[in-house]
Image (cartoon, rainbow, N blue to C red):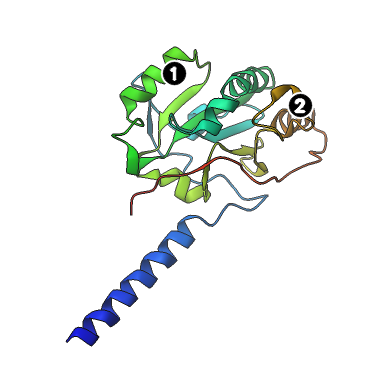
């Protein structure tokens, strides 16, 4: 009986590990944006979807949160990026997928306070049960996914190459990708490694 129980525990652990790996398999370049019709609640109490946020030249999705130090370091640049996206007719949304610590600084009330305090100029919404993060295969906050007008993935990864010192940034990956996308030119760097905190998924 004890042996059977051990086997069952091993099988369950294996299935859970497979589920987590599948959930975190990241979208490949050229993939179509998933879950475009999924409704999410933003900090203003609106129900919005990715398709509603998208604009003429595309859609920018950033997985973000309230409690990650890396997000804090990039926060001002996220507001600058929102302006660049707006000027280039690209919709932008930040999604908070940290379900496991939702009541420890990541609730919708916490998000509202954060958005107000930091003067967010972009849509900040709750990714309940990290459904969209799972569909995208996102693993970090912040992590960026940029789609073109046909909702095909053209850039993913990090915002730039220096979270700690904005004045020492050498490669503005996301800004450059946005401007190239809107201008119809080639995005030179299409993929980088995201840097930040792991998404706090429910077990």
Residue 108 occupies quadrant: top left
Q: Quadrant of the N terminus?
A: bottom left
Residue 117 occupies quadrant: top left
Is residue 61 visible in the rendered structure shown here? yes
Badge 2 or badge 1: first in the primary sequence:
1
Is residue 43 visible in the rendered structure shown here? no
Q: Is the C-beta separation of discs 2 and 1 under 8 Å?
A: no
Say which element carries label 2. Answer: helix
Q: Which residue is mark 1?
A: 115
Residue 158 drawn at (x, y percent): 65, 38
Mark drawn on residue 168: 2
Q: Which residue appears at 59% of the width and 32% of the height?
A: 60
Residue 178 left/right relative to 27? right
Q: Residue furthest front?
A: 164
Task: Give how far apart the Cα atoms at labels 2 and 1 are.
Answer: 27 Å
Specify few, some or many for label 1: CA neighbours under 10 Å numbering under 14, 14-19, or 20 or more. some
Residue 151 left/right relative to 141? right
């Amino acid at each position: 009986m004890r042996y059977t129980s051990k086997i069952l525990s091993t099988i369950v652990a294996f299935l859970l590990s497979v589920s987590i790996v599948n959930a975190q398999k990241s979208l490949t370049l050229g993939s179509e944006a998933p879950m475009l019709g999924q409704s999410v609640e933003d900090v203003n109490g609106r129900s919005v979807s990715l398709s509603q946020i998208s604009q003429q030249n595309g859609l920018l999705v950033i997985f973000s949160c309230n409690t990650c130090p890396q997000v804090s370091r990039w926060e001002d640049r996220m507001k600058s990026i929102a302006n660049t996206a707006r000027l280039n007719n690209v919709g932008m949304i930040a999604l908070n997928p940290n379900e496991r610590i939702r009541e420890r600084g990541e609730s919708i009330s916490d998000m509202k306070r954060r958005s107000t305090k930091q003067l967010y100029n972009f849509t900040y919404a709750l990714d309940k049960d990290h459904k969209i993060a799972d569909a995208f295969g996102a693993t970090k906050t912040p992590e960026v996914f940029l789609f073109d007008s046909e909702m095909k993935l053209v850039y993913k990864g990090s915002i730039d190459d220096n979270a700690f010192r904005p004045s020492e940034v050498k490669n503005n990956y996301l800004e450059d990708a946005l401007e190239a996308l809107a201008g119809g030119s080639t995005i030179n760097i299409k993929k980088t490694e995201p840097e930040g905190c792991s998404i706090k998924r429910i077990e």
